[in-house]
Image (cartoon, rainbow, N blue to C red):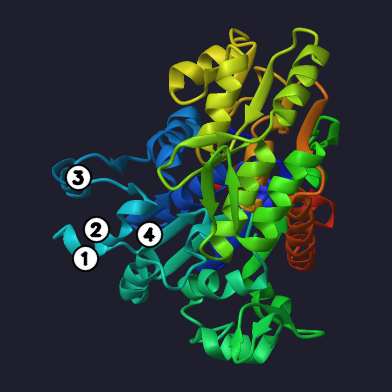
Amino acid sequence: MKYKAHPYQAYATNFILEHPIAAILLDMGLGKSVITLTAINKLIQQGQVHKVLVIAPLRVAKSTWPDEIQKWDHLKGLSYSVVIGSPAQRKAALLADTDLYIINRENVKWLVEDSGVAFDFDMLVIDELSSFKSYQAKRFRSLMKVRPLVKRVVGLTGTPSSNGLMDLWAEFKVLDMGQRLGRYISHYRERYFLPDKRNQYVVWTYKPKPHAAIYDQINDITISMRSKDYLQMPPLTMNQVKVNLSSSEQEVYDTLKNQLIVEVKHQQINALNAASLANKLCQMANGCVYDEDKHQILIHQRKLDALEDLIEGATGKPVLIAYWFKHDLAQIKSRFKVREIKTATDIKAWNEGQIPIAIIHPASAGHGLNLQAGGSTLIWFGLTWSLELYQQTNARLWRQGQKQPVVIHHLITSGTIDEQIMRALARKDKSQLALIEAVKAELNGGKEYEQHYVELLG
């Protein structure tokens, strides 16, 4: 297929060409893979780059990047090797003589420390830079060992600060080795943040200082683009469907919340710490809770009833249901005939309109999964605290190419932690949007970059 870059795509590709270190913050659907591959192709043609490593989520590494290379005529000259499978298969893929080596992020530690193959890449692309937001993670530490060996780095993500601006330190440390936000997380915290929630001397959370100049520090290597500014996005309706517990059901919930222990149907439910309590309250809000032996105990079916109403209200149109806990899946399956979206066959069947009710877990509904052809209604049965998973799941249906207005329903159990999760997602989104707006790409209408796309294609 012939590639005619949109002005924003030519702008982003040109930005990568002109910046050896580049943070490209692009919303889902803007074509970050082809933007980056076009730049890589040009750099290889110019002799500036010879060996490129792409780190991506597993599904994206396995399918999306290879598919993009094969899709576009101007990329036909690029050769690639997908570094997945058994250790022997991965090593063989690394030893192949090729331009691009595409590996999933879970194997970064193996690549650096255990593969036995020299790390001699001169360009690094991190697809979903946000997956390196934890400076304590093994993948981050391993990559930092070899980061000085790489002369060009591109970080791609649409969710750079899904848990707040503290995430940015590790992400930009991978990019510039601490040049802009500091070499140490402690210095970053001290310079840009104030203690927020604490327990005596232990600080649990931090908040940005007034007028913290984080955006100014990263602006020179960062651009951001939002889908609504460049794409014809379908209309979107976000809806909250409230359900109410009975007095006895609410009492069970409140007892666990206040006392960290409650007896339900002769089974004792304990919450040993704050994390355990939050997890069990989420379970209860959805309808069930696990006991110590991992047996599910039914608390209510309020969300199931509301889900039934929504499915009936869809009047035969396909619906996609997002669940969180395994007992959510079991409860939904007990009432409805559903099909899980797990394989390429499932995806194809959904997009061909063969699945009236589909169900998916947000962790498997992430990057590179296109479901917009199969339906336009998404129902969140169980919520997630993760803004990244939340936005990525929504973007499976609400994206360019969707022919119908999209409706996203959220089943919210009143008086429960569900309400806190929705508020938390809204707060995180506001913080992230502030960052994206601060480093927003200015195309001057895009006119000056239209001429570049011909040159970029060689």
| Residue closer to the observer: 172 or 306 | 306
Q: Position of residue 294 (x, y in %)?
A: 43, 41
Q: Where 354 sits versus 73, above or below?
A: above
Mark 4 → mark 1, Cα distance in angstroms? 24 Å
Tag in front: 4 or 2: 2
Q: Which mark is residue 110?
A: 2
Mark 4 → mark 2, Cα distance in angstroms? 24 Å
Residue drawn at (36%, 55%) of the image:
52
Residue 371 visible within the image: yes
**For residue 142, what is the image quadrant?**
bottom left
Mark 3 → mark 2, Cα distance in angstroms? 17 Å
Q: Residues within 10 Å of mark 2 (few under 14, many from 20)?
A: some
Contact flag, marks 3 and 2 (Cβ < 8 Å): no
| Residue closer to the observer: 366 or 182 | 366
Question: Residue flagged by tag 4: what amino acid is it?
Answer: Val
Secondary-structure class at tag 4: loop
Residue occupied by mark 1: 113
Question: Residue flagged by tag 3: what amino acid is it?
Answer: Ala
Question: Residue flagged by tag 1: what amino acid is it?
Answer: Glu
Contact flag, marks 4 and 3 (Cβ < 8 Å): no
Precedes in sequence: disc 3 or disc 1 = 3
Residue 149 visible within the image: no
Contact flag, marks 1 and 2 (Cβ < 8 Å): yes
Secondary-structure class at tag 2: helix
Residue occupied by mark 3: 96
Question: Residue flagged by tag 2: what amino acid is it?
Answer: Trp
Quarter of the figure with the N terminus: top right
Q: Which mark is residue 49?
A: 4
Q: Position of residue 189 (x, y in %)?
A: 61, 86
Q: Where 127 sits versus 272, above or below?
A: above
Secondary-structure class at tag 1: helix
Precedes in sequence: disc 4 or disc 3 = 4
